[in-house]
Image (spheres, rainbow, N blue to C red):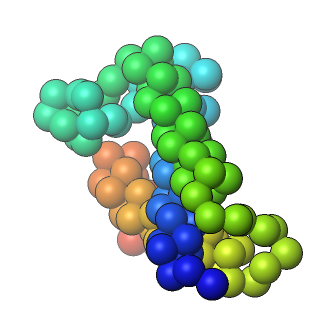
Amino acid sequence: MNWLWLLSYFFAGAFAENAIPHFVSGVMGRPFQSPFATPSGKGLSSSTVNVVWGFFNAAVAYLLLVRVGQFHPRWTSHIVAFGLGMLLKSITSARHFGQFHGGNAPSRP
């Protein structure tokens, strides 16, 4: 087992998670934050930019997952590395985008 493979699978999970909100927002025709907006990560980018950015992230995830090492979905360590990448990136995204979309507001009884 090569630890660099696991690191690659971790980042594949992070890129895969990042692809989802950008691609879905773009396909739905909605603007969404992206690194290409002004200010970066806070302003809104067009739906077309988000589709392209989401597709790019999915392609990078694919390359890191399938082209590095020998990923096997039945190997627990491979799935755990990929899943942790997705989970940690999801939490980061939820906190960041929640600032703009009301997701970090305290719940009221």
* Quarter of the view holding residue 13: bottom right
Image quadrant holding the N terminus, namely bottom right
Q: Return the residue nearer the eye: 71 or 106.
A: 71
Instruction: Indicate left or right for 69 with 94 as reference.
Output: right
Residue lying at the far left in this picture: please name it.
39
| Residue 23 image point, x, y percent | 56, 32
Q: Inspect this view and state whether residue 54 appears.
A: no
Q: Return the residue nearer the eye: 15 or 90.
A: 15
| Residue 84 image point, x, y percent | 56, 75
| Residue 29 image point, x, y percent | 54, 17
* Quarter of the view holding residue 5: bottom right
Name the residue at 68% across, 83% down: 77
As drawn, 82 above or below 12: below
Instruction: Indicate left or right for 79 with 84 as reference.
Output: right
| Residue 82 image point, x, y percent | 61, 69
As drawn, 37 above or below 78: above
As drawn, 69 above or below 48: below
Q: Return the residue nearer the eye: 80 or 63.
A: 63
Name the residue at 14% across, 34% down: 39
Instruction: Indicate left or right for 83 with 15 as reference.
Output: right
Q: Return the residue nearer the eye: 5 or 50.
A: 5
Name the residue at 57% across, 40% down: 58
Q: Inspect this view and state whether residue 18 appears.
A: yes
Total marks placed: 0
Name the residue at 56% across, 80% down: 2
